[in-house]
Image (cartoon, rainbow, N blue to C red):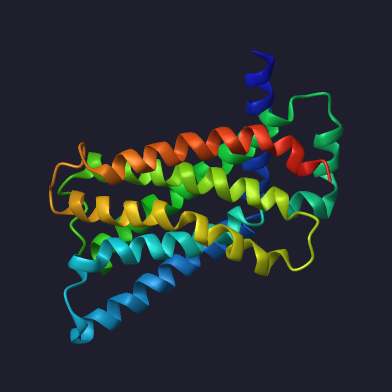
Amino acid sequence: MRYLSIIFLVLKKELKDEFRRKEGIVASFFFALISLVLFHFSFDSGVGDISQSGAGLLWLIILFAGTLFIGASFKKEEENGTFYALLLAPVDRGAIYLAKFLSNLILLTLLEVFLLFISYFFLNIPIFNSPLSICFVFLLVSIGFSSLGTLISALLINERGSAVLYPLLLYPLLIPLFMGGATLTNEAINSKDIRSDPWLHLIILFDILFLTISTLLFESAVEE
């Protein structure tokens, strides 16, 4: 119970701080909106049918927009010194990581809901063909993205040029996750059954592996 209460308290602090500052949220939502508008006008000029490649574009926008706040999730703690206060607290550091992970997952989910509805109007992507399948795929990919992104953000907290290093370390590791997400999203949009798809099994394995490893390695990652 104490472990869960620590997660809840840190998560509450993270969300209150994020919605008070609004920097990461506003930047990511604005980037996502601008990207969708640009893609809309690009495909509107006769490049092709956006509904056929919309899944890949959506995940590309999510990757870049999500990086804006996930990559800075520990950097803002260093600026005001609260991160070191958290590390000095007599609590399991795995709980701190899980709270950070859940905070990033919630913000990423809000971004994706926003993107899905906007893409329905701007890009004419039929997201309501299989809404449950699409939501399930987005949740699974978001778990993997948030778990790995949160750990790498912690690893680079004291590194110079972390804004450059972060995507260089994160993006190659996320390639299979986002390839699977784009493939499954496209199948769900076309009302196909994704339950037996090998990509789905790979994404679930990715989530379990990286969430477990990240939770266990977080204490070692922040000892420096």
The quarter of the picture where residue 104 lies is: top right
Q: Is residue 28 visible?
A: yes
Asked whether 42 or 23 is in front, the reply is 42
- Horizontally, residue 196 falls left or right of residue 92, namely left
- Horizontally, residue 96 falls left or right of residue 131, namely right
Q: Position of residue 218 (x, y in %)?
A: 69, 38
Q: Is residue 99 visible?
A: no
Number of disc labels: 0
Q: Position of residue 13 (x, y in %)?
A: 69, 37
Q: Position of residue 76 (x, y in %)?
A: 74, 54
- Horizontally, residue 118 falls left or right of residue 50, namely right
In the rendered image, the quadrant that contains the N terminus is top right
Q: Name which residue lies at 47% across and 41% down.
A: 143
The outermost residue toward the bottom is 45
- Vertical placement of residue 15 versus 79, above or below: above
Q: Name which residue lies at 82% across and 43% down.
A: 82
- Vertical placement of residue 67 versus 91, above or below: below
The outermost residue toward the top is 1
Q: Position of residue 188 (x, y in %)?
A: 20, 49
Q: Name which residue lies at 63% across and 34% down.
A: 215
Q: Name which residue lies at 71% across and 64% down.
A: 162
